[in-house]
Image (cartoon, rainbow, N blue to C red):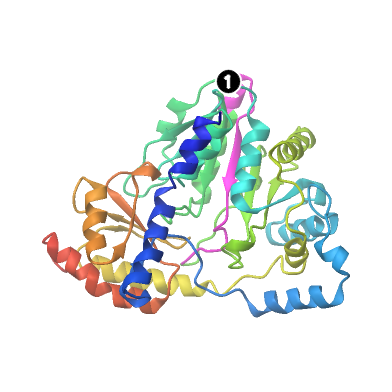
Amino acid sequence: MYSLQMHKLGSCRSVIRELFEYGKKRKAEIGDDAVFDFSIGNPSVPSPSSVRDTLIKILTEEEPTAVHGYTSAQGDPAVRKAIADNLNQRFGTDFEADNLYMTCGAAASLTISIRALITEDADEFITFAPFFTEYRVFVESQGGKLVVVPPKEPDFHIDLKALEKLITPRTVAVIINSPNNPSGVVYPEEVIRELAALLQAKSEEYGRKIRIISDEPYREICYDGKTAPFVTKFYPETLICYSYSKSLSLPGERIGYILVSNRMQDWKDVYAAICGAGRALGFICAPSLFQKLIARQAGATADLSVYARNRDLLYGGLTSLGFTCVYPDGAFYLFMKTCEADTSAFCAKARKHELLLVPADDFGCPGYVRIAYCVSSDMISRSMKAFAELAAEYGLSPR
C-alpha cells in the first residue's frame, strides 16, 4: 500500500518541470541554440565572485567538522543573527536571531509555515491569481484548502473586494508573492496597507488572527526605482518566506529562511510552532556550509541589472510584434496573453517554432503564458524570429 495522493504528485510533474524536461530532451536532439527555453526560473546570472571566494575561505580555513557538521535545528545562532542584523539595517526593524528559522529554500519555508499555522483539516489559505503553482500542493498536502481570488485584470494587483467575500471563519492565512511569479507585478505600499486593514478587521470580526505569509524570493529584483514593501512593517501578523536562490543565484543550494515577526503578540508561540513543523517535516539543520556562506554574504546580490535589460528587450520585442503583455515591475517573468482561448493549443503551436512557454492555467489564469527571461540576452534576441513567425500564424499586426 502507498499514498494515492503522493503517487499522483510523483507521477505527474508540474507543468513547468514537464516543459523543462522536454526542453533538455529537445536540445539534445537539435542543439541548444535551436531551442528557446523560457520555461523555468533558473537564474542565468552567475553568483557574485565573493560567493566563490567566501566558500573557498570557509573550506580552507575552518575545521571540516565545523563546516560540514550539524547546526542547531533552527539554524546556527550566529548565522541567524547576521541575517537579522542585515534586515534591521535595511528595513529599520529590530529582529533577533530567534525570529529566524533557516530552511532549504522558499519551498521548505512555505511548507513549514503552512504546517505550523494549520489547526485542522479544511483550514483555508487564500492566495491571488496568478499564483505560483506549487501553493496548491503545499496547502493541500498538509490537509488545508487553497482558496483563490480571481485575477484582477489588467494590473493584476490584489482585488480587495473579491478577497473580502472569500474570507471566512476558517481562514488561517493569506499568501502573497511580490514581486509576483508569474506576472512580475510588485504590490505597492498602498495596496499592502489596505490589505492589512482588511485582515485586521476580519480578524477582529471572527476572533481569530489571520496571518500573512509573504513569499519573497524575488524581493531584490525590482525595476524602475520600485521596491517591494517590507510587509512586517504594515501588518504584525506576518511570516516572511525567503530564499537566496534568485538574489544570489543559488537555486540549487536550497538555502533560505522563515522570519517570524516580533510584532506578533504571540510570536514566540508561532516560532515554536515553526520549529515543531520543521521537526515534523524533517526540515531541520539547513545545509551547514551555505548557512556559513549566507552569514558572510547576507547583503550581497548577483548583478540583477541584467534582468532589467532582458525585460526591456523581451517586452519591447513582443509588443512590437502585436502580442499583449503585462509590464513587469520585478521578478524575471513576462506574462503574455495567448492569441486563442485554448492556452495549451497556443503553447503547442509555439513549440512548433521551438518556443517553450508555460501555460498559465495552473497559475489560475487561463489565456496567458509565463515567459521566464532569466536567460541570456542573446537567446532573447535570437528568439524574436520564432516569435515573429508565431505572431504571423495568428495574423497579428506589428506595432
SS at badge 1? helix
Point out the image quarter for the C terminus. Answer: bottom left
Question: Which residue shows up at 84% across the image and 50% down it?
Answer: 72
- Foreground residue, 168 or 107? 107
Q: Taking the image as drawn, is residue 399 in sight?
A: no
Q: Quadrant of residue 381?
A: bottom left
Single out the residue that lies furthest toward the left: 395
Question: Which residue shows up at 59% across the image and 72% down it?
Answer: 302
Q: Taking the image as drawn, is residue 225 in sight?
A: yes
Residue 4, placed above or below residue 283: above
Say whether residue 209 is magenta.
yes
- Foreground residue, 11 or 32? 11
Instruction: Give the magenta-colored segment's residue range.
Output: 201-223
- Foreground residue, 63 or 300? 63
Disc 1 designates what residue? 205
Q: Position of residue 260 (x, y in %)?
A: 71, 43
Q: Position of residue 177 (x, y in %)?
A: 51, 48
Q: Relative to residue 37, is residue 207 drawn left or right?
A: right
Question: Which residue shows up at 69% across the image and 67% down it?
Answer: 299
How many numbered markers are drawn? 1
Q: Position of residue 360 (x, y in %)?
A: 35, 48
CA neighbours of label 1 inside 10 A, class few (<14), some (14 to 19), many (20+): few
Give amino acid for label 1. Glu
